[in-house]
Image (cartoon, rainbow, N blue to C red):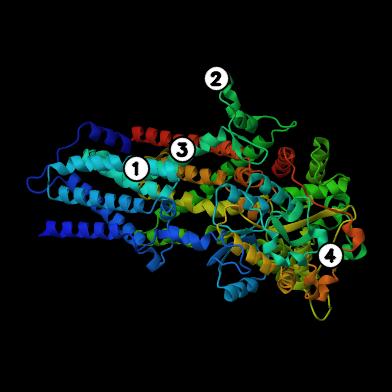
Amino acid sequence: MKKKWVILLVTAVLLLAACGGGPGGGPGSESSTGGDAADNTDAVPQLADQLSVYNWADYIDEDLLKQYEAEYGVKIIYDTFASNEDLLAKLQAGATGYDVIVPSDYMVAQMIELGLLAEIDLNKVPNFANIDPDFKNAPFDPGNQHCVPYQWGTTGIAYRAGHPYFDENPPDSWAYLFDPELLAQYADGGINVLNDQRELIAAALFYLGYSPNSTERTQLEEARDLIVRAKPYWKTFNSEDYDDSLLIADEVVLSQSWSGDAANAYWSTYSDETEDGNWYYAIPQEGAVKWMDNICVTASSPRRDTALHFINYLLDAENGAAITNFTYYASPNEAAKAYIEPDILSDPGIYPPAEVEAKLQWLTELGDGLFTWDEMWTAIKGQ
Amino acid sequence: MALSTTEEQTAAPPRVVMEAGIDPLWKMAAYVSLGGAALWAFLLFRWMTFSSFGWTPLGAELALSKWPPILPYLIYGGLLVADLVVGVGLLRGMKWARGVGLATAVFAILLALVYFLLLREFWGATIILALALFRLLLLTRQVGWSLAYPAAFWLGIFFIAPMVVVFVVSLGERTRLGTVAYPPFELNNIGIYFNDYVRFFSRISGEFIYLRIFSRSVWIAVLNTIICLVIGYPFAYWIARQPKKYRSMLIFLVMIPFWTNFLVRTYAWILILRDSGLINNFWTITLHQQALLLADNSAFFAWLAEATSRKLPLLFNQPAVMMGLFYGYLPFMILPLYSNLEQLDWNLLEAAADLGANARQSFMRILLPLSMPGIVAGSVIVFIPSLGAYVTPDLMGGAKVSLLGNLLQQQFMTVRNWPFGSAIGFIMMAIMLAATLVYFRTLAKNQQMT
């Protein structure tokens, strides 16, 4: 009895398998919705049913994502990272499944060289015309073959408004971060620097009058010694949540800071009575780092057309403005300026005037010089 | 221990033949086969109903979809039929079933290897391999190995194999783009593979930067172990001397913090210790105001009013890191100490007192030697994670000072020098292994003594 039953079952399964028509090739058939590279002649591409986006933390107004999902029926899987290096490490370790990523300038150059980014067809991103020509064709991605600009900003100094010392001497130089004589005046209130190898050493190089991308050993050693001398006066190395946990919480009085984080601290502490916030931002006179984050499509993405469609959506004038109104970082989107809040547009910390902008410099890929930087950083952290 | 028994039993497999029914090992093999059959049936079902149910594709299925559509049916169907036949055959005590079972097991092992090599799909290959190997062991009557198999397979796949990978990576060198490359092999130049190990111990532009981080980490780990021991020992002793009904309650209280994630507890400490935190608010506001009111009356309050005008530096410094480590690892010291002290024969202490030993003598000569296994176990369990501590120095130390854990993270993430990171990992592992060996040695000595 039992045996018969088993045989019956086996034959039934085999029969079913032999039919083979049901599944239509199993998940293989799914690739037709995923790999939409074929039909690129249509004005509206056939969109995949989901898209995964990997962005910096707190770097977009998430309502935009919901709106996109509702409008186009594409489910967005949103995930965040804390540094360019995190992003690269994850992609290099073989993480697939990310379609849209947002690396910064020097990282874009490196990712292109590693073959991690797909070439994009700008014809499918008509809103690229909205971008300010100054930000097109950047040195790290000539001709915007791989990426389009997302947001840009500067790295300067944020300081506590109303601090007696800063009221007299508003910080306008990197000396306020590195000069022990100055530091002794206010260091008991707490000082934070960015826990970011490139940014901190670049600031020291600016102060010393060198290029922020120097790979000269003697210059880097000078920067290291400068940092080691100033380090006892610093309270924390934080580049992840310092605007909330240190600035707004009043744990420090001065911090190396990205422009948008300082503006976030300002507006979060803004009071209608005094018509002022607690945190001011300055771009030091020696010069500072200018950076730009870029929207790119990963080489491993099977949903390139959907990715480009999403990028085009972000480059829309009103959407670009919504991002800036949320993050307080400057938008390279010229057309968006009409919708950006006037307070942000007129903030010299976010949109620096021309004479300040002339002193800003990009960080570029260091090549083998990275080893020397790493050595200095290890020595700084090991002290 | 476990290994030696295994060997004994492999040498002489006990005959467990029952009068009626089937050999239990074969019965087990039959169940494994039927379990495998159920798995294949499920996968086949998924494959057939893919479009109608809209399953989320597994890695194996995505990989298989690259092949011609008939192949998955052949693979799933073939494995299903083979497993079913073997399982039923074994349960019925068929003579041929064992031979067929062995053959299919060997075939499945080969299939898993080919499948992995061709499609690089890890989970599918692992599952096929696991089932096939288990059946092979059961059918060849390897009793010891069969019993140890689930744990051994787990260790092999998730511990030994990754270690081999890490070691191989540590022999390479970082290219300009952050990938790993291996220098060409030359017999008289093998040292080149160990450059990263040499670098860790060598002077770089006049300073031993890595050794300094290393020695600081070891120092902090040792210090933390000592503090935990000094505080934990009397505490464990006290619990062990309580009436029995309270003891488990007290140990339960020690373990309660584990219910909350370590990261959350660390952030809680930050909220308590920071400048605008609980303690400093009490210190600079409540206490300060009271002291000010009384300052005119006495010198003490005048001093207190002066002291409370400044915030206490409680966070983002070395003591804060020590505090965080001590807090995190104290229970790991108390638990082994307690379980050791609890089993102690307290009559020995009474006897010592009767024979005229004073408190110090009976502690040094009776309590301490007898509780040595607990002390060593607790110390090893505290020392090893303290050495690799990463979150505590990063969050409570303000990331100002690197320890080994931070150095590792930096090598893998910021610098992307995987070979050097792997080498550091291996050096750390060697130290931890040494610490563990000390533990087992002491334990063995202690067992000889008693």
Q: Check the image and report above or below for A96 versus A48.
A: above
Residue A349's mark?
4
Identify the image quadrant of residue A162: bottom right
Q: Residue at x 56, y 24 (%)?
A: B185
Answer yes or no: do the residues labelled 3 and 2 have beta carbons within 8 Å?
Answer: no
Q: Are marks 4 and 2 on the same chain?
A: no
Q: Are marks 1 and 3 on the same chain?
A: yes
* Furthest-bottom residue in this view: A273
Mark 4 or mark 1, whichever is nearer to me: 1
* Residue annotated with mark 2: B187
Tag 4 subunit: A
* Residue annotated with mark 3: B436
* Furthest-front residue in this view: A41
Of the two numbered discs 1 and 3 on the same chain, state the one appearing first in sequence.
1
How far is mark 4 from mark 1, CA to CA? 63 Å
Whether residue B171 is visible here, answered yes or no, is: yes
Amino acid on which disc 1 is placed: Leu
Residue B111's mark?
1
Of the two numbered discs 1 and 2 on the same chain, state the one appearing first in sequence.
1
Of the two numbered discs 3 and 2 on the same chain, state the one appearing first in sequence.
2
Residue B124, position in %: x, y?
39, 50
Whether residue B1 is visible here, answered yes or no, is: no
Q: Check the image and report above or below for A151 versus B365.
A: below
- Tag 2 secondary structure: helix
Residue B43, position in %: x, y?
34, 57
Q: Residue at x 47, y 41 (%)?
A: B162
- Tag 3 secondary structure: helix
Identify the image quadrant of residue A44: bottom right
Amino acid on which disc 2 is placed: Leu
Q: Check the image and report above or below for B55 versus A64.
A: above
